[in-house]
Image: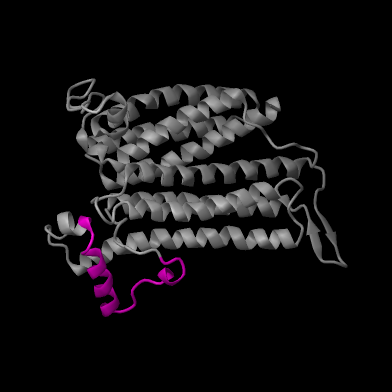
Amino acid sequence: MENTKTFDRNSGIVSARPEALINWLMSVAVLVFIMVVVGGITRLTESGLSITEWKPITGTLPPLNEAAWVSEFEKYKLIPEYTEISGPAGMTLAQFKFIYFWEWVHRLLGRVIGLAFALPLAWFWIRQAIPAGYKPRLLALLALGGLQGTIGWWMVSSGLSERTDVSHYRLAVHLLTALFILGGLVWTALDLKAYEKNSAAKPAKITRFSAIVLVILFVQLLFGAWVAGLNAGYVSNSWPLMNDQFIPEGVDMSSGVFSALVNDPFLTHFVHRWWAWVAVIALVMLARRTKAAGVRSASIAIHSAFGVQILLGVATVMTGVNIVFAVLHQAVGALVVATTVWGAHVIGRRNGA
C-alpha cells in the first residue's frame, strides 16, 4: 500500500488523511440511514404535522413544561389535520405528545447530521487533510444537506393550511434527496478508500450500464415515495394480485392516464409492486458484473438487500401496512440504495468510464 499520510511536526498540519475521512463519511451515512428510518416512523405514526413552526435554533429543545405543551397543542389544533381528523377522533394531550416526540426527534437528527458533517469538514479543511479534488464534492454534500432541511419544511408546510396531510410530491422530493445524500456519502467514501490504497487512483465514474440501473431504481423509489404519501399501501392487502385483480379496479382515469399514474393510489401501488421486478432484474445484472470485477462481497450485499426488501414489501402489503414491516421496508430500501451505489462504484473503477 502506498503511504498517503504525511505529518509536518513544525506546522502541525496533516495532509491526505483518507482513513479518517472515510470513517467520518461512513458515520454520517449511518446517521442519514437512521434519519430515513425515523422519517418512516414519523410518517406512519402521522406525526409529521405535529410541529407547526420551523425554528432551526430555538426548536432544538422540546416543550419543557405543561404550559409549553398546551401552547404547542393549541397551535396544532388550528390545522386541518386536527380539525378534520385528530380532533373528531378525540385526541388527548398525551397522544399529541407522542406524535410530537417523533417529529421532534426527526428534526433533531437533521440538526445532528448537519453538525456531524459541517464541523469535521471544517476541521479537515483547516488541517489540510482533504485530498486534492474532493473539496468541491464535500461542499456540494454540505449544501445538499442544508437544502434538505429547507425541503423538509417545504414538505411540512404543504399540510398546514388546506390539506390534512403533506403533498406526496414534496414527500418524494424529501425522501429521494435523503437517499441521494446517502448515496453520495457512500460513493465518496469508496473513492477515498481507493485513494488510500493508491494515491494515483482516480475517482470512479458512473458507467452507462450503472446509470441505467440507477434510473430504474430511482423510478421504483419514486413510486414507493408516492405510495407512502398517498397511503396507497392500504388499498390492497393481497399479493400478488390486488384485491383478486391483476389490474386493480377503482383507478380514477377521469383526468387522464398521467394524472392517474402520479395521483391515484391504486395505480401507484400497482406500478410500485410490478416495477420492482424490473429493478430486481437490473440489480441482478449489476451484482453479476460486480462479482465479475472481483468484489463478491458487493454482489452478495446487493442480492441480500433486494431479496429482503421484496419479502418486506410483500409482508407490508399482506399485513395491511403493519408499522414494523413498513418501517423495515423503508430502512432496507435505504440499504438497497447503498449497496447499489457500492456495485456501481466497483464497475466504475474497473472500467474507468
Q: In the depicted view, which residue is nearer to us: 178 or 239?
A: 178
Q: Residue furthest right?
A: 10
* In this rendering, position of residue 153 left or right of residue 282: left
Q: Is residue 86 visible?
A: yes
Instruction: Write down the quadrant of residue 308 in the picture.
Output: top left
- Quarter in which the C terminus is drawn: top right
Question: Which residue shows up at 62% across the image and 63% down it?
Answer: 119
* In this rendering, position of residue 119 left or right of residue 68: right
Q: In the depicted view, which residue is nearer to us: 322 or 108?
A: 108
Q: Residue 127: percent from the left, percent from the top? A: 75, 62
**Residue bounds of the magenta highlight:** 55-81
Question: Which residue shows up at 53% across the image and 53% down it?
Answer: 145
Q: Determine if the magenta segment contains residue 62.
A: yes
Question: Which residue shows up at 28% across the image and 70% down it?
Answer: 72
- In the depicted structure, whether residue 318 falls above or below residue 10: above
- In the depicted structure, whether residue 149 falls above or below residue 186: below
Q: Residue 99: percent from the left, percent from the top? A: 28, 60
Q: Is residue 308 visible?
A: no
Instruction: Write down the quadrant of residue 221 in the picture.
Output: top left
Q: Residue 297: percent from the left, percent from the top? A: 58, 33
Question: Which residue shows up at 38% across the image and 27% down it?
Answer: 276
Q: In the depicted view, which residue is nearer to us: 188 or 215?
A: 215
- Quarter in which the N terminus is drawn: top right
Q: Residue 299: percent from the left, percent from the top? A: 55, 29
Q: Determine if the magenta segment contains residue 10.
A: no
